[in-house]
Amino acid sequence: MEKHKHYNALKKTLKTLSESHKKWYSNYGPYASEPSKNLKKDDRKENIFSKDITSSFFTEYIKYYKTDFFLGCSFEVYKKTYNQRLKDYLAEFFDADEINFISDELDEGIYNYKFKEFNSDSFDGDTIRSYEKLKKQIHHSLKKRFEFLSHKAKENGFDLVYNEFENSTTEKEKYSLEPIKHSLETKEEVLMNYSDSKLTEKIIALDEMGVLDFLKAKEPFNMSTNRLAEYLSLCLGQKASSIQSYINPIINKSDQTKSPYNTEKTVEKTRQKLIQIGCKID
């Protein structure tokens, strides 16, 4: 089922969906998503497959969303698998680039599900509420996924825009990927000021761009983390002792309680600043 390729991890759900389509097509015609279409009011029947499909999806979602990639998995899993899936895509389509991959990802879905057979009418109130909570969780994951793809597109010189107004009037989600236009006119460049960044952000920025590894390979820093802390104190205008406590967990893999990477919000904030500057983050 090529149109559901981003759900390959949910094998039981895809099997249930496939079997239901075969039965529906053979017994009632090509209206798997609209079982009552073209039937008289008194002859309309409930889609007996939608409950199984819905139940199977959420059961497998709970089982796999933290470990396996599929459309709607946790953002942590999506981000972790992105580079390998991009590599596989480029190997399969040798003339493609990352923008083609991003477009392919978005064509699979942005916020809407592929499964039109979802129907919660047959469930009890508690089950319906639990499913609504899971739907909200999936929406948050998909929102982070879109923001992540937007940053990736920008790194490749494209603006990604979700056309929300158009999507409200059509079933198919609309988006655009347009090359970022650079003005040919000579203008004075506006410089962003990051001088108020926290020390943890500065250390993360140095590490993300390989500066700490570069300096650690030089004398006398290859012999002493303290000397490196003193040098960075000279450059950053911060206390050497504070710098030492942050770089030590990174360089020596020692006690991680003071690692600047412990706060995910700070890490993400720093990476976004680097992206704004134009740095490419792996």
Image (tube, rainbow, N blue to C red):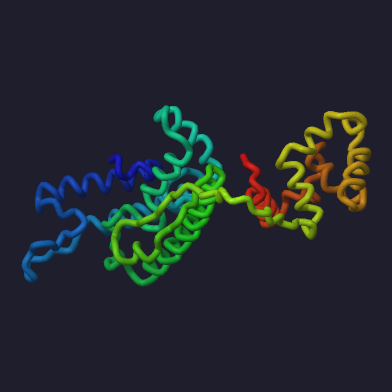
Position in image of residue 126 (x %, y %)? 39, 70
Identified at 42% across, 27% down, the residue is 94
Closest to the observer, 164 or 73: 164
Closest to the observer, 179 or 114: 179
Identified at 86% across, 29% down, the residue is 218
Q: Is residue 172 above or below residue 254?
A: below
Q: How many numbered discs, if any?
A: 0
Position in image of residue 49 (x %, y %)? 23, 55
Residue 65 appears in view? yes
Closest to the observer, 225 or 194: 194
User: The N terminus lies in which quarter of the figure?
Assistant: top left
Give the side of residue 37 with respect to residue 278, left or right: left
Residue 264 appears in view? no
Identified at 84% across, 42% down, the residue is 248
Closest to the observer, 138 or 65: 138
Position in image of residue 219 (x %, y %)? 90, 29
Q: Is residue 229 above or below residue 192?
A: above
Position in image of residue 272 (x %, y %)? 64, 52
User: The C terminus lies in which quarter of the figure?
Assistant: top right
Give the side of residue 57 with respect to residue 276, left or right: left
Give the side of residue 233 with respect to residue 123, left or right: right
- Which residue in the rendered view is the most extreme toward the front? 185
Identified at 75% across, 56% down, the residue is 194
